[in-house]
Amino acid sequence: MPTFDPVRAFRKLAYNNALANRRLLHACAALKPGEFEAPRTSFFPSIKETLNHIITVDWFYVDGLEGGTLGYQAFEFEEPFDDIASLGAAQAAVDQRLTALCEALTPEKLVSIVKLHRGDRIQEERMEDALAHLFQHQTHHRGQVHAMLAGTSVAPPQLDEFIVADDARFRSKELGELGWSEEKLIR
């Protein structure tokens, strides 16, 4: 009987994260003028603000997970992107960094201490805990954007069919566009 492999689990979460972000941002690219920044009911009051929050938090955590010292400079601009195309390209780049980080994980690395520069202090966390937090953060705010899309001209995309083998038929096009194989995703 196979045993649980936390390295594999985090790697799959990184792939799921990148695919879900890609799908959500592709849907947002089809919004009519004004819908991206229009006021909506959610934690952040627009799709634009929510997606900008996701990326700045990603910059903060991915940098810390990589051993960097960017810290709160990640939040220097509350909304660094005014358009979905630029935001989408930047999100794909940080997703690629996170995926590469997870592909290089080892059991030892997962329990290593990550230093997150919080301005006046350095927060120390186990890498596995920081990763779990980051993936939860992503999922939480993607869900908010997904719900906000329901009030636009664009139907919310399917976001939860990525990491199990039976769902391969739903992701083949996107895997090809990313240069990924099914074997890479489910290994």
Image (cartoon, helix red, strand yellow):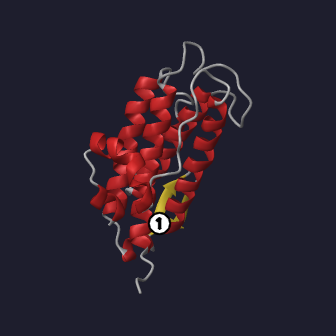
Q: Using the image, determine if residue 173 lies above or below residue 48.
A: below
Residue type for callout 1:
Met
Is residue 148 shown left or right of residue 18? right
- Quarter location, residue 3: bottom left
- 116 or 82, which lies in front? 82
Q: Using the image, determine if residue 6 lies above or below residue 170.
A: below
- 68 or 142, which lies in front? 142
Q: Residue at x 29, y 39 (%)?
A: 177
Residue 21 visible in the shown view: yes
Q: Residue at x 74, y 30 (%)?
A: 41
**Residue at disc 1, secondary structure:** helix
Q: Residue furthest top?
A: 33
Q: Residue at x 65, y 39 (%)?
A: 144
- Give the number of callouts: 1
Image coords of residue 171 (percent x, y): 39, 47
Q: Which residue is mark 1?
A: 127
Is residue 8 shown left or right of residue 157? left
Image coords of residue 5 (percent x, y): 42, 76
Q: Residue furthest bottom?
A: 1
- 15 or 45, which lies in front? 15
Label 1 Cα crowd, 10 Å radius (few <14 / some 14-19 / many 20+): many
Image coords of residue 30 (percent x, y): 49, 22
Image coords of residue 55 (percent x, y): 49, 39
- Quarter location, residue 93: top left
Residue 119 visible in the shown view: no
Q: Using the image, determine if residue 37 lies above or below residue 20.
A: above
Quadrant location of the N terminus?
A: bottom left
Q: Using the image, determine if residue 31 lies above or below residue 169.
A: above
Q: Residue at x 49, y 51 (%)?
A: 161
Quadrant location of the C terminus?
A: bottom left
